[in-house]
Amino acid sequence: MESSLSSQVSEDSVFHPVWQRDPTAWFPGDEKTSALIAGEHIWDDILGLSKVRDRCKDEYDRKLLLKYICIELRSLIEVMDKLQAAVMSAEVYDVDTKPLWRGITNEEREVARELWKNYSTAKKQVESDLINIRNRIAAHRDFSYKSKTIEGVTGWNLAMLLWDRLDVSLFKDLMSSIPPAFNHAKDLNIYEWNRTPEDGTIEILGGPVSK
C-alpha cells in the first residue's frame, strides 16, 4: 500500500502474515479491513509466482505456474468482492461536511463506481474459467465422467480443454482492472485498525493505513 497516512503510521507498522508479525503492528479491526490485508497479500503472491514464471523457459513449467496463479486469482476475486461491497455500501457525505465516524464523499463514490464496474466486467468474462480450472485441474482434481458437463465435455476431455485454455490472455483484463479498484479502495476512510503498543494499552485508528 502507498503511504497515505505516513505522518501517523510508518510504512512497516501494518500487520502482514509473512513480513510483519510484531505485536505492536496495526492489525485489522473488522472484516473489510481484513479483506484489505488479504488482498495485498494475495496480490504479492501472484506477483511472486509471475516472477518465477518469467524466469522459466520450459513451457510445461510456465503453464504449471500459471495454473497456480489462477488459484490465487480466484481467491483474490472473493476478497475483491468483499471490498467492493464495503466501498459501495459506505456512508456517503458531502465534501463540505464530515461523517460521524467513517464514510466517503460523493466524488469518491462516483470514482469507485466506475472502477468497480470495470472490475466486474472483467471478472464476469473469466470467473467461470477460473473456478473450473481450480476445481477440476488445480486445487482440486476431478476427472470423473459422472461429473457435471462443462461446454459439452467432462472427465479427461474436460481436463484437456481446461489445460489448453491456460494462457495469460485469459485473465489479462482482470489483472489490469484489479489494481486501480484496490488502490482507490485502500485510501478511503472506511477501515478500522488497532494495536497494542504495550501491555494494557490499546490504540484504535480509522481511515487508510500504509503498508
Image (cartoon, helix red, strand yellow):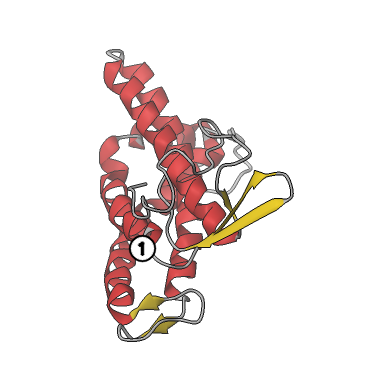
Apparent side of residue 38 relative to residue 184 in the rendered image (left or right): right
- Which residue is more in the foreground, 126 or 30? 30
Estimate the x, y position of residue 88 in percent, counting from the top left.
Answer: 43, 73
Name the residue at 48% across, 69% down. Answer: 85
Element carrying mark 1: helix
Toward which corner of the image does residue 98 lie, by quadrant? Answer: bottom left
Apparent side of residue 135 relative to residue 2 in the rendered image (left or right): right
Name the residue at 42% across, 58% down. Answer: 208
Q: Is residue 37 visible?
A: yes
- Which residue is more in the foreground, 80 or 199? 199
Q: Is residue 151 visible?
A: no
Toward which corner of the image does residue 183 lie, by quadrant? Answer: bottom left
Estimate the x, y position of residue 177 in percent, counting from the top left.
Answer: 29, 54
Q: Please, which residue is most extreme toward the right here?
A: 200
Estimate the x, y position of residue 119 in percent, counting from the top left.
Answer: 33, 60
* Amino acid type, label 1: Ser
Say which residue label 1 marks. 120
Number of other residues with Cα within 10 Å of mark 1, as a class: few under 14, some 14 to 19, many 20 or more: some
Name the residue at 59% across, 35% down. Answer: 22
- Which residue is more in the foreground, 210 or 39? 210
Quadrant the C terminus occupies: top left
Image: 18 above or below 91: above
- Which residue is more in the foreground, 8 or 141? 8
Name the residue at 44% across, 49% down. Answer: 9
Q: Please, which residue is most extreme toward the top here?
A: 58
The number of discs equals 1
